[in-house]
Image (tube, rainbow, N blue to C red):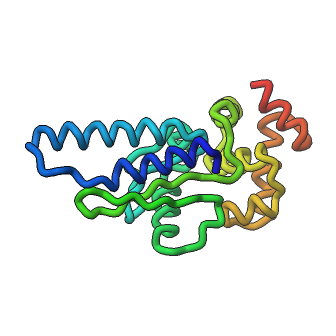
Amino acid sequence: MSSRSGFVAVLARRLVKFPLRRASPKRALRRESSSLIALIAGVEAIGAPAFIVEKSGRVLHANANGRLLIECDPTAIAPLLARMLAGAPSDGGWELIPLSGRNGSQRFLAIRSVATRTASAVAFVHTASERWKLTRRQVQVLDLVARGMMNADIGRELQIGVTTVEFHVAAIFDKAGVSNRATLIARLHEL
């Protein structure tokens, strides 16, 4: 995790742990709102996909890269986070940071920490998916290919077989009009 996202995580923990003093409801609401605004601003500053989630895996907020990740596969993020929060291993490079809610509710800051990408790299894949008319799974495969992952690693990450990955990579090559990964990456950056 970068030092910037580490700082944001520390800030987020502090903002949600401090209990409100007994004050007027109006003052308490104002204070709660300012803490929430600061937390959301901190999450937005994280370069990696980041989410504020409930114990159930329900996403309460996603930063810009998190929203792009959700766009690629809208039904996958919440169940993945719920499984990790239930104790399943996090083999996708996720870091979960507990946040204590004022009313006792458990929330977490979930950050995808490995192979983070810039917003421009996410935009390249997003543009390619529209231009080449890729399926949702092909977008996921292209995303991982663009990060330099090999077919076996992509299969493990997406929990599919290597031959299925090869099928998707071949379909992406056809749609992009290329014959190898190097040319695919170059074409991707030309978009």
Q: Where is residue 3 in the image (x, y as percent from the top left)?
A: 62, 45
Q: In which quarter of the image is residue 158?
A: bottom right
Residue in the image at 52% along x and 68% along y: 84
In this view, which residue lies farthest toward the top?
190
Residue in the image at 82% along x and 30% along y: 187
Residue 129 visible in the current orientation: no
Residue 86 visible in the current orientation: yes
Relative horizontal placement of residue 31, taking residue 145 as reference (left or right):
left
Relative horizontal placement of residue 144, taking residue 174 as reference (left or right):
left
Q: Position of residue 184 (x, y in %)?
A: 84, 37
Residue in the image at 39% along x and 58% along y: 99
Relative horizontal placement of residue 104, taking residue 145 as reference (left or right):
left
Q: Which of 60 and 76 is in front in this view?
A: 60
Residue in the image at 34% along x and 63% along y: 106
Q: Which of 163 and 110 is in front in this view?
A: 110
In this view, which residue lies farthest toward the bottom?
87
Q: Which of 34 and 66 is in front in this view?
A: 34
Q: Position of residue 176 (x, y in %)?
A: 80, 35
Q: Position of residue 90 (x, y in %)?
A: 60, 67
